[in-house]
Amino acid sequence: MSDLNFKHLRYFREVAHAGNLTQASRALGVAQSALSTQIHTLEERLGHPLFERVGRRLVLTEAGRVALDHADAIFAVGEDLLATLRVGSGHRQVLRVGALATLSRNFQIDFLRPCLGRPDLEVMLTAGSLAELLGLLRRLELDVVLCNAAPASSPADGFVAHRLAQQPISLFGATALKGTAKTPRDALKAHPVILPTGASSIRAEFDALCDRLAVTPTIVAEIDDMAMLRLMAREAIGLAPLPAIVVRDELEAGTLREVVQLPGIRETFYALTYQRQFQSPVAEELIAKASRWQD
């Protein structure tokens, strides 16, 4: 059995993404007839048609979609290999970081700070949902993902969760809010609250705490973004359960104050990587430095 010809695979991938031979032949600098011949050769090698013609477009068959997924993965690994082995050879490195869209900006900056401003490094930061980011990480389009929840996955999935920091959650409020509270129960009885949505781990633990305290808080807003949560807290409409890192700037400026710490509620921050032969050395360095935050 002959080996797979990666030149054929590259041509197929270009046609699949372009959707027609004309555009692909221009991009590759190959005549359409030669390109068509190469695609047919690959189809014979794989034993399945990869395209069907719909009007003027070439549409992938089911086998074609499977082949494209593998081709994208193969060439992504090749690009990763080139980028990794160029380290130290005078080429500029790229660090590709994904971050949960709702994640604290202060945490993201703290993680990236050791490498910011390096003349040999470009940082690319992508925000999204955890599912979106894990997909990019699996396809080697990201080097590391920052989040506040470890994915529900098995070792076979290939993801590695590095726990970086854990912070207690407190109720924070605007300094304009009058009164003091010695206990969470007192604070929740005296003030309304601004809460993260039910998808948040903080919200689930907060609801459980209220149940234990036999308190039904008055909710004035529910928000799925930590940055907006702290901004709403600054408006003095209620207290917000947050880790101190989220409101660090407001605490230093005196616009927010810690009212009371919530017992047993903590937020954990993670860096997620994917098992691969060539890890980004910059990502590994940042994870190692951030892991010492717990020491």
Image (cartoon, rainbow, N blue to C red):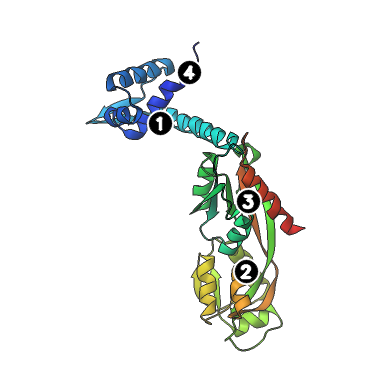
- Quarter of the picture containing the C terminus is bottom right
Q: Amino acid at mark 4?
A: Leu
Mark 3 lies on a secondary structure that is strand
Location of mark 3 (residue): 271
Question: Would residue 196 be found to the left or right of residue 269 on screen?
Answer: left
* Dot in front, 2 or 4: 4
Residue placed most toward the observer, 24 or 197: 24
Which residue position holds label 1?
Answer: 65
Give the quadrant of residue 89: top right
Residue 134 drawn at (x, y percent): 54, 46
- Label 1 or label 3, whichever comes before in sequence order: 1
Q: Which residue is mark 4?
A: 4
Structural distance between the alpha carbons of marks 2 and 1: 45 Å
Is disc 4 placed on a helix, strand or loop? loop
Residue 6 placement (x, y as % from top left): 46, 22
**51 or 77: which is nearer to us?**
77
Q: Nearer the viewer, mark 1 or mark 3?
A: 3
**Which callout, 2 or 4, points at the residue further toward the start of the chain?**
4
